[in-house]
Image: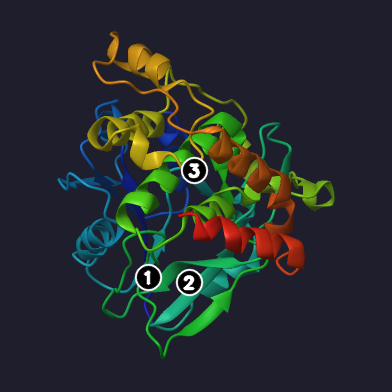
Amino acid sequence: MAVPKIICMTPVKNESWILDRFLKCASLWADHIIIADQMSDDGSAEIASNYPKVTIVKNESPIFNEPERQELLIHEARKIPGPRLLIALDSDEFLTSDFMFSPEWDTIIKAPEGTVIRFQLPVILPDLRSYWMPKFTVPMGYMDDGAKHVGRKIHSPRIPIPNTASTIVLREIKVMHYVGIDSDRWESKHRWYQCWEHINQPQKSAVDIFRQYHRKDVIPDQEIKPMPSKWLKGYESHCIDMTSSYREPFFQTDKMVLDFLLEHGPEKFRHIDIWNVDWSDCHKKIYGRESTRSLKDPRNRFEKIVHYWLRQTQYQFTYFSRHRTNIVTRIIQSIIKCFGW
């Protein structure tokens, strides 16, 4: 089998805070980098255009739609002739630099067509010296055989995963998730996820949405580990800064939540845990003026108590203790759901 072209596929929407670092790192291992830019207005496309391996395709969808952007990326990748290894990463995700010398790299390069490659996804924490590891692996690589991609509206598989596919699970090379290097940005992202799910998946209860997007808040101390130096050393040897953190004047995901509030009204989101933000002040910061619509917290006393109780019991719903939920919590949670939660 001929040596495959390694193609990095990455969706982008206003990712200038990290995109330059991502492209420097990806350029070390990818033969081609395909960026699907969804109408960024923060200079992301301009940053990407500075890299010779990058091909930019326009994602002109006005809405969040994971399958659509994945199909766009895969379609563009398949224009490249010959064998192809597809690796699908977001712009805040980085292969650990030990890919440069790990035997696992040779293993995936030689994988037969139709093979799915799964990675562990350690979340890098704000000190950029420690991480925690979710207890699952993520399919991010595919030795392309032209199989059809089947996606979901949110949290979709990024690559084709045929029922007949063989799988390689990597244990040394990982994908570092830099979402955790700024806890405020991470929280903002999860506020947006909660609102999106509440709008687009109305069958999902507010309680279940809360539980899903607050697991990171109760990571046990014993699950936080020091980051091995080999994860960054190879990049730093190429003079790539892997440890600084850039903070924008506001988070794009907060702007997107604000747009939801302006479109639907705060009342729709009274059961969603987004009210630790002063959205009137956020509007003024982003748009330079007061909102003509009230953006005040619509919750009553009972609803605030429910959110407090959910936070206090969230430790029973972490990635690390899925079976610790006690019967009292289950009963109270069922009663709360009867009240429209």
On screen, residue 98 above or below 243: below
Q: Secondary structure under badge 1?
A: loop
Residue 98 rendering spot, x and y as whole percentages: 64, 54
Q: Which mark is residue 190?
A: 3
Q: Is residue 294 visible?
A: yes
Q: CA distance from mark 3 to mark 1?
A: 37 Å
Residue nearest the viewer, comparing 247 with 268: 268
Camera sees residue 237: no
190 lies above or below 299: below
Mark 3 residue element: helix
Question: Pointer 1 and pointer 2: residues touching (CB < 8 Å)?
Answer: yes
State the image coordinates of residue 196 (x, y, percent, origin top left).
36, 48
| 60 relative position to 282: left or right | left
Using a 10 Å C-alpha cutoff, classify the residue at mark 2 as few (fewer than 14 neighbours), some (14 to 19) or many (20 or more). some
Q: Amino acid at mark 3?
A: His
Residue marked by disc 2: 109
* Distance CA(mark 2)–CA(mark 3): 35 Å
Which one is in front in this view, the residue at disc 2 or the one at disc 3? 3
Residue 4: assigned label: 1
Q: Residue at x 57, y 39 (%)?
A: 302
